[in-house]
Image: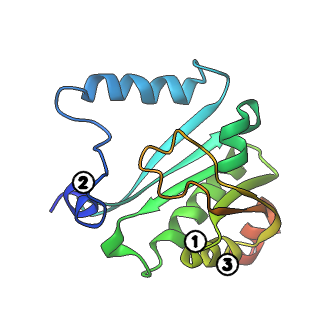
Amino acid sequence: MRYYEIVKKYNPNVKPLATKETFDEYIKGIERRVNGVDNGIFIHDYYLMENDDIIGLCCLIINPEDDKDLYDYTGNVSYIIRPDKRQKGYGSVCLHLLIEEANKLGLDDITVYCTEDNIGSRKIIENNEGKLVGQNVYMDETDTDMINYGKNNLKFVINIKESLTKFLKIK
Protein backbone atom coordinates (compact mmCIF):
# COMPACT_ATOMS: atom_id res chain seq x y z
CA MET A 1 0.00 0.00 0.00
CA ARG A 2 1.32 3.48 -0.81
CA TYR A 3 2.09 6.12 1.84
CA TYR A 4 -0.83 8.36 0.94
CA GLU A 5 -3.36 5.50 1.01
CA ILE A 6 -2.16 4.37 4.44
CA VAL A 7 -2.22 7.87 5.92
CA LYS A 8 -5.67 8.53 4.42
CA LYS A 9 -7.02 5.55 6.39
CA TYR A 10 -6.09 7.39 9.60
CA ASN A 11 -6.99 10.91 8.46
CA PRO A 12 -9.58 11.09 5.66
CA ASN A 13 -8.94 14.85 5.24
CA VAL A 14 -5.29 14.44 4.27
CA LYS A 15 -4.32 15.56 0.78
CA PRO A 16 -1.46 14.15 -1.33
CA LEU A 17 1.71 16.22 -1.56
CA ALA A 18 1.54 15.89 -5.32
CA THR A 19 -0.50 14.17 -7.98
CA LYS A 20 0.54 13.01 -11.42
CA GLU A 21 -0.72 16.34 -12.77
CA THR A 22 1.04 18.50 -10.15
CA PHE A 23 4.28 16.55 -9.70
CA ASP A 24 6.46 18.89 -11.83
CA GLU A 25 5.27 21.91 -9.84
CA TYR A 26 5.86 20.01 -6.60
CA ILE A 27 9.49 19.36 -7.61
CA LYS A 28 9.94 23.03 -8.55
CA GLY A 29 8.58 23.96 -5.12
CA ILE A 30 11.13 21.71 -3.44
CA GLU A 31 13.90 23.35 -5.46
CA ARG A 32 12.66 26.82 -4.41
CA ARG A 33 12.57 25.73 -0.75
CA VAL A 34 16.11 24.28 -0.83
CA ASN A 35 17.45 27.42 -2.51
CA GLY A 36 15.61 29.83 -0.23
CA VAL A 37 14.15 31.61 -3.23
CA ASP A 38 10.78 32.55 -1.73
CA ASN A 39 11.79 34.26 1.52
CA GLY A 40 15.35 33.42 2.57
CA ILE A 41 14.17 30.36 4.47
CA PHE A 42 15.86 27.16 3.32
CA ILE A 43 13.89 23.95 3.73
CA HIS A 44 15.52 20.58 3.15
CA ASP A 45 13.00 17.76 2.70
CA TYR A 46 13.86 14.14 3.41
CA TYR A 47 11.98 10.88 3.07
CA LEU A 48 12.61 8.08 5.54
CA MET A 49 12.53 4.90 3.47
CA GLU A 50 12.55 1.18 4.16
CA ASN A 51 13.27 -0.65 0.93
CA ASP A 52 10.90 1.12 -1.52
CA ASP A 53 8.42 2.03 1.19
CA ILE A 54 8.02 5.61 2.53
CA ILE A 55 7.97 5.44 6.34
CA GLY A 56 7.97 9.15 7.02
CA LEU A 57 8.67 12.67 5.85
CA CYS A 58 10.86 15.16 7.64
CA CYS A 59 12.40 18.52 6.96
CA LEU A 60 15.13 20.75 8.31
CA ILE A 61 14.31 24.44 8.15
CA ILE A 62 17.12 27.00 8.05
CA ASN A 63 16.31 30.60 9.11
CA PRO A 64 12.75 29.87 10.34
CA GLU A 65 12.96 33.05 12.44
CA ASP A 66 12.49 34.99 9.19
CA ASP A 67 8.83 33.89 9.23
CA LYS A 68 7.13 34.46 12.59
CA ASP A 69 4.40 31.84 12.12
CA LEU A 70 6.86 29.22 10.94
CA TYR A 71 9.20 29.93 13.83
CA ASP A 72 6.45 30.09 16.47
CA TYR A 73 4.82 26.80 15.48
CA THR A 74 7.46 24.70 13.71
CA GLY A 75 10.99 25.89 14.47
CA ASN A 76 13.82 24.15 12.62
CA VAL A 77 12.33 20.68 12.37
CA SER A 78 9.19 19.03 11.13
CA TYR A 79 8.58 15.30 10.82
CA ILE A 80 5.73 12.87 10.43
CA ILE A 81 5.83 9.10 10.60
CA ARG A 82 3.23 6.95 8.88
CA PRO A 83 0.63 5.95 11.52
CA ASP A 84 1.18 2.20 11.10
CA LYS A 85 4.95 2.68 11.67
CA ARG A 86 4.75 4.76 14.85
CA GLN A 87 6.18 3.55 18.17
CA LYS A 88 8.83 1.55 16.33
CA GLY A 89 11.75 3.97 16.62
CA TYR A 90 11.38 5.64 13.23
CA GLY A 91 10.62 9.06 14.72
CA SER A 92 13.81 8.95 16.78
CA VAL A 93 15.80 7.94 13.69
CA CYS A 94 14.20 10.75 11.68
CA LEU A 95 15.00 13.43 14.27
CA HIS A 96 18.52 12.09 14.82
CA LEU A 97 19.23 12.23 11.07
CA LEU A 98 17.98 15.82 10.98
CA ILE A 99 20.30 16.65 13.91
CA GLU A 100 23.21 15.17 11.94
CA GLU A 101 22.26 17.31 8.93
CA ALA A 102 21.97 20.41 11.13
CA ASN A 103 25.48 19.69 12.41
CA LYS A 104 26.80 19.43 8.84
CA LEU A 105 25.24 22.82 8.10
CA GLY A 106 26.99 24.37 11.10
CA LEU A 107 23.99 24.91 13.38
CA ASP A 108 24.63 24.90 17.14
CA ASP A 109 21.02 24.45 18.25
CA ILE A 110 17.68 23.62 16.69
CA THR A 111 14.18 24.46 17.85
CA VAL A 112 11.50 21.78 17.76
CA TYR A 113 7.82 22.02 18.65
CA CYS A 114 5.16 19.46 19.45
CA THR A 115 1.69 19.78 20.87
CA GLU A 116 1.32 18.95 24.54
CA ASP A 117 -0.88 15.93 23.81
CA ASN A 118 1.68 14.41 21.40
CA ILE A 119 3.42 12.24 23.99
CA GLY A 120 5.29 10.18 21.37
CA SER A 121 6.86 13.22 19.74
CA ARG A 122 7.74 14.70 23.12
CA LYS A 123 9.60 11.51 24.05
CA ILE A 124 11.44 11.56 20.72
CA ILE A 125 12.53 15.16 21.28
CA GLU A 126 13.57 14.59 24.90
CA ASN A 127 15.46 11.40 23.97
CA ASN A 128 17.45 13.53 21.52
CA GLU A 129 18.40 15.92 24.38
CA GLY A 130 15.57 18.40 23.76
CA LYS A 131 15.05 20.83 26.62
CA LEU A 132 11.63 22.41 27.18
CA VAL A 133 12.11 26.19 27.01
CA GLY A 134 8.60 27.56 26.44
CA GLN A 135 5.13 27.08 25.06
CA ASN A 136 2.43 28.85 23.10
CA VAL A 137 -1.03 28.12 21.76
CA TYR A 138 -1.02 26.72 18.23
CA MET A 139 -2.88 29.31 16.16
CA ASP A 140 -1.45 28.64 12.68
CA GLU A 141 -4.47 29.04 10.42
CA THR A 142 -2.50 27.61 7.49
CA ASP A 143 -2.72 24.18 9.16
CA THR A 144 -5.14 22.96 6.51
CA ASP A 145 -6.72 20.12 8.45
CA MET A 146 -6.65 22.17 11.69
CA ILE A 147 -5.91 19.14 13.87
CA ASN A 148 -3.54 21.16 16.07
CA TYR A 149 -5.32 24.52 16.06
CA GLY A 150 -5.85 25.85 19.59
CA LYS A 151 -3.65 23.21 21.26
CA ASN A 152 -0.84 23.98 23.70
CA ASN A 153 2.40 23.89 21.67
CA LEU A 154 5.63 23.02 23.53
CA LYS A 155 8.94 24.57 22.44
CA PHE A 156 12.15 22.57 22.83
CA VAL A 157 15.75 23.45 22.02
CA ILE A 158 18.25 20.73 21.14
CA ASN A 159 21.95 21.49 21.42
CA ILE A 160 23.46 19.67 18.44
CA LYS A 161 26.77 18.72 20.09
CA GLU A 162 25.06 17.44 23.27
CA SER A 163 22.67 15.32 21.24
CA LEU A 164 25.38 13.89 18.99
CA THR A 165 27.67 13.24 21.96
CA LYS A 166 24.93 11.21 23.62
CA PHE A 167 24.11 9.15 20.56
CA LEU A 168 27.38 9.00 18.64
CA LYS A 169 29.84 9.24 21.52
CA ILE A 170 31.74 12.10 19.85
CA LYS A 171 33.16 15.14 21.59
Residues tagged 3 and 2 counted as in contact (Cβ below 8 A): no
**Label 3 sits on residue:** 127
- Mark 1 and mark 2 lie on one chain; the one further toward the N terminus is 2
Residue 42 percent coordinates (x, y): 62, 32
Work out whether 102 lies above or below 86.
above
- Residue 75 in view: no
Residues tagged 1 and 2 counted as in contact (Cβ below 8 A): no
Residue 80 percent coordinates (x, y): 45, 60
Which of the two marks, 3 or 2, is nearer to us in this view?
A: 2
Which amino acid does the dot numbered 3 rest on?
Answer: Asn
Q: Residue at left 55%, top 77%?
A: 120
Residues tagged 3 and 1 counted as in contact (Cβ below 8 A): no
Please tell me how crowded label 3 is: few (under 14), some (14-19), or many (20+) other residues with Cα within 10 Å: some
Residue 77 percent coordinates (x, y): 62, 52
Which amino acid does the dot numbered 2 rest on?
Answer: Tyr
Specify the label residue 121 is tagged with.
Answer: 1
Specify the label residue 4 is tagged with.
Answer: 2
- Mark 3 and mark 2 lie on one chain; the one further toward the N terminus is 2
Q: Dot 3: what SS?
A: helix
